[in-house]
Image (spheres, rainbow, N blue to C red):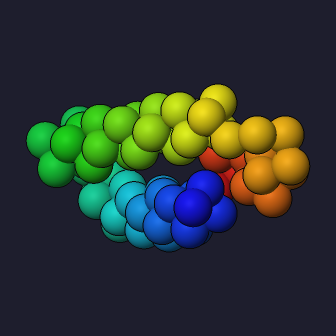
Amino acid sequence: MFIGRGAMLANELRSLKAQIQAACSQNQTAQDCNDIKMRQIGAVQRYQMLLSEAGPTCRTSLLDPLAL
């Protein structure tokens, strides 16, 4: 359960990172850039909540959210 949710959130974070690079490389103050950054913050928070819910064994299987 935790591993599956972690994988989905990790994929979302990787996708958001790529979207930020694309949107913010053109104009860091653009609304699109800021919107994606806010979505990334929300995804990191959801991933951190998942880490806090997971037991120690599952936690070791999940990646550090800042590494994604």
Q: Is residue 36 left or right of residue 10?
A: left
Whether residue 5 is situated above or below residue 65 in the rendered picture: below
Residue 62: x and y in percent read 74, 55
Q: Is residue 32 left or right of residue 13?
A: left
Residue at 20% over, 42% down: 35
Residue 15: x and y in percent read 42, 68
Residue at 61% over, 56% down: 2
The quadrant of the rendering that contains the N terminus is bottom right
Question: In the depicted view, which residue is nearer to us: 12 or 60?
Answer: 60
Residue 43: x and y in percent read 41, 44
**Toward which corner of the image does residue 56 lie, by quadrant?**
top right
Q: Is residue 22 visible?
A: yes
The quadrant of the rendering that contains the C terminus is bottom right
**Toward which corner of the image does residue 26 lie, by quadrant?**
bottom left
Residue at 56% over, 68% down: 4
Residue 17: x and y in percent read 47, 59
Question: In the depicted view, which residue is nearer to us: 38 or 27?
Answer: 38
Residue at 64% over, 30% down: 52
All told, the count of numbered labels is: 0
Q: Is residue 43 left or right of residue 23?
A: right
State the residue lying farthest toward the left: 31
Q: Is residue 30 visible?
A: no
